[in-house]
Image (cartoon, rainbow, N blue to C red):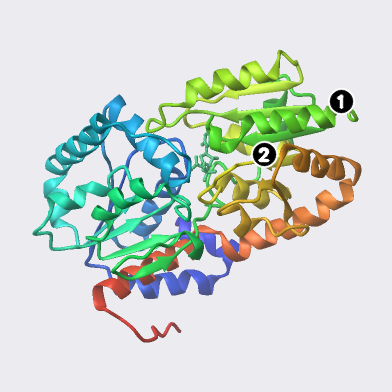
Amino acid sequence: MGKLDRLAEITGLDVIEHLYQLAHWISEVNVVHINSTREGGGVAEILKNITPLMEELGIKVRWEVITGTDVFFQCTKAMHNALHGRHVVIPDKFISEYEKINAENAERLRDVLMDADIVFVHDPQPAALISHFPDRKGKWIWRCHIDISRPVRSVWRYLKNYVVNYDASIFHLATFAQHLPHPMFLIPPSIDPLGEKNIPLPDSEIQSVLSQFGIDPDRPVVVQISRFDRLKDPIGVIEAYKMVKRYSPSLQLVLAGGGATDDPEGMTVLEEVKMAAEGDPDIKILYLPPKSDRVINALQRGATVVLQKSIREGFGLTVTEAMWKYKPVIGGDTGGIRLQVVNHHTGFLVNSPEGAALRMRYFLNNPDKIEEMGNKAHRFVLENFLITRHLRDYLTVMISILYGLKGRLELV
Ligand code: UDP
């Protein structure tokens, strides 16, 4: 049984049939996705899930990853932070490295990219590739995964010089879109319910993962899964935990996450988090190796409450993953978290450690609410954020870009 058949058992057969009908239009098309890391972070997670399904639909698809130096990734992380609105200075030597690495990758990938009918370029890291393909034959789409609603203007102006050359761009939310001279599409991300990170797990496995990390399954545990990144506010999570701990001494906190090859700040932030934990044995700081999908799955399922207290967030796949597992989420009131956490229904939106603490206490004191809101959270993901919806959106964008369709596409 193919994966699409197994997905049909979750989504209904009509959803999968529509995908095949759409894919039929582009069966001869060469598609390439490019990003800057094969593991760690949401973009890699999505590409890992979506490219095999495109293949199963009969589409010729490749996933390429650009390679870079430390200085290049320092530059792109600074750009990332600036586009999220944090004031950072990007030295000229970083910018030169950004341009140089993009030029080198353009040469390395020239044949693949010249041959492509559609190229999805994900995020700012590889955005400058396009400037090396003035005679490209395919359509190039810039796929933005970050919240650029309030960017540092100078950094956005620089990047925009590249982005304007694309044939289209895709954002998660309307508020992220910018003035650009080409079609813009809104497509939120998704999770794969059949991936190791989201499949149901036996209770015994969840218990064994918890005990492996010294987490007591009989006491409440609050979990945040994230790369160690200041924008995920791990220190704010610890502050919130400390406030609640005074009233609920049995509370435990898990902050778990690994690095991403395109994020050079992880280790520094990890050290900051360890300092903030002040040796509290009930705070477990777990630096996870790549391919920890089942462990993350178990931690999310074993959580009493899941937090994603980000200060800025493009989407927050960890929120979707937790909601799929019937966990309401206490999430930062920002970016893509707002799209998923419907306040008081699928979780709570918070703006401070105090707010997070208040909501944590509420859940700890009202376990029936965890169940009620968790059920709504699961349903919301089923209806809006599964990979099948994401695929349908991508296929529709490709058809519309290739055929210039302005009217309706009839699916039976
Ligand atoms: N993730 C992971 N290992 C880690 C930390 C995170 O596999 O150590 C996954 C996480 O489960 C989610 C993705 O990486 O699927 C993070 O996506 P999100 O949109 O939450 O944040 P990003 O890292 O892209 O800012």
Instruction: Using residue 251 as the reference point, say whether residue 310 is left or right of it.
Output: left
Q: Which mark is residue 250?
A: 1
Instruction: Using residue 3 as the reference point, say whether residue 90 is left or right of it.
Output: left
Position of 39 relative to 84 (above/below): above
What amino acid is labelled 1 in the image? Ser
**Residue holding disc 2:** 300
Instruction: Using residue 218 as the reference point, say whether residue 154 is left or right of it.
Output: left
Where is residue 389 shown, x and y percent of the image?
50, 65
Disc 1 and disc 2 in contact, CB within 8 angstroms: no
Question: Which of the two residues, 401 or 290, is positioned nearer the viewer here?
Answer: 401
- Residue at screen point 54% across, 37% down: 231
- Residue at screen point 80% across, 40% down: 360
Residue 171 location, quadrant: bottom left
What amino acid is labelled 2 in the image? Gln
N-terminal of the two: label 1 or label 2? 1
Q: Is residue 27 among the parts visible in the rendering? A: yes
Where is residue 201 shown, x and y percent of the image?
66, 40
Question: Which of the two residues, 385 or 131, is positioned nearer the viewer here?
Answer: 131
Observer-side mark, 1 or 2, equals 1
Q: Is residue 123 among the parts visible in the rendering? A: no
Position of 107 relative to 385 (above/below): above
